[in-house]
Amino acid sequence: MPTIAIIGAGPGLGAASARRFGREGFSVALVSRGARGPDALRGELAREGIEARGYTADVRDTASLERALDAAAAELGTVEVLQYSPVPSREFLRPVLETSPADLAAATAFSVLGPAAAVHRVLPGMRELGRGTVLLVNGASAAAPNGNVAGTSVAFAGESAYGAMLHEALAPEGVHVGQLIVPGAIGGGDPLFEPDALAGRLWGIHTRPGGFRVTVGG
């Protein structure tokens, strides 16, 4: 049974992805800062016949993230799909003139060092399988800087560059790296941005790999 590791496994998109990939035969590693949310979701998924386990990690603590992914691979099997979609902290969403160097450092740890640590942990297993998918989920500021959310604009740009380079480097090995840009509020009422719809887009990126970036509504 293939395994998907969802980093940022909350009640919205993380839960929807867990259900979508779980229905397709994946076991699910739910990675989150707090144990309570993944534990509750794991129970819901179990009642739906989906195997899932919860793991606690802070994406700004790369050691904890690495331990969580190692445990997931040991307990559920090689991670074949990695979804990196934690919700940015409010400190990353300040106007540029109110954003400090410390804010930028934290945002970079969250959106660049975090995914880099996760990818490096799961990539050897994907390479051994000869297949795999890395799914990066970002807001609109990853594609167009927005001075009202300076931290994410800077850090998402770095994440985008890193992902695009990985996409090019890993495609010959059968490992696809794709980015989903969500230019709106998830679950805000627009059907395109509902969690189930976005999980479907992520499933499509995994099953029909193409270019690096896919924009919802674009």
Image: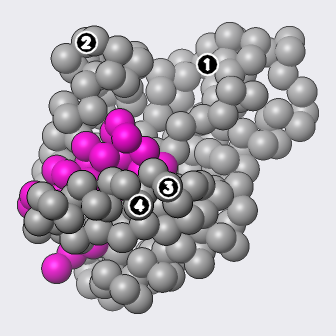
Residue 98 position by quadrant? top right
SS under mark 3: helix
Q: Earlier in the sequence, mark 2 or mark 4?
A: 4
As displayed, is residue 178 above or below residue 147?
Answer: below
Q: Residue furthest right?
A: 101
Are circles 1 and 2 on residues that touch, CB within 8 Å?
no
Question: Looking at the picture, how far across and down is residue 208, in whole percent?
Answer: 13, 51
Q: Residue at x 37, y 24 (%)?
A: 186
State which quarter of the image contains the C terminus: top left
- Give the CA separation, mark 3 to mark 2: 29 Å
How many residues crowd around disc 1 within 10 Å: few (fewer than 14), some, or many (20 or more)? Answer: some
Question: Looking at the picture, how far across and down is residue 15, in whole percent?
Answer: 31, 46
Q: Which mark is residue 39?
A: 4
- Give the CA separation, mark 1 to mark 4: 36 Å
How many residues crowd around disc 3 within 10 Å: few (fewer than 14), some, or many (20 or more)? Answer: few
Q: Residue type at mark 4?
A: Asp
Q: Residue type at mark 1?
A: Pro
Question: Looking at the picture, how far across and down is residue 146, in whole percent?
Answer: 62, 14
Q: Residue at x 42, y 57 (%)?
A: 38
SS under mark 1: loop
Q: Which residues are magenta?
A: 1-24
- Nearest the eye: 43 or 1: 43
- Name the residue carrying label 2: 190
- Give the CA separation, mark 3 to mark 4: 5 Å
Q: Which mark is residue 145?
A: 1
- Give the CA separation, mark 3 to mark 1: 34 Å
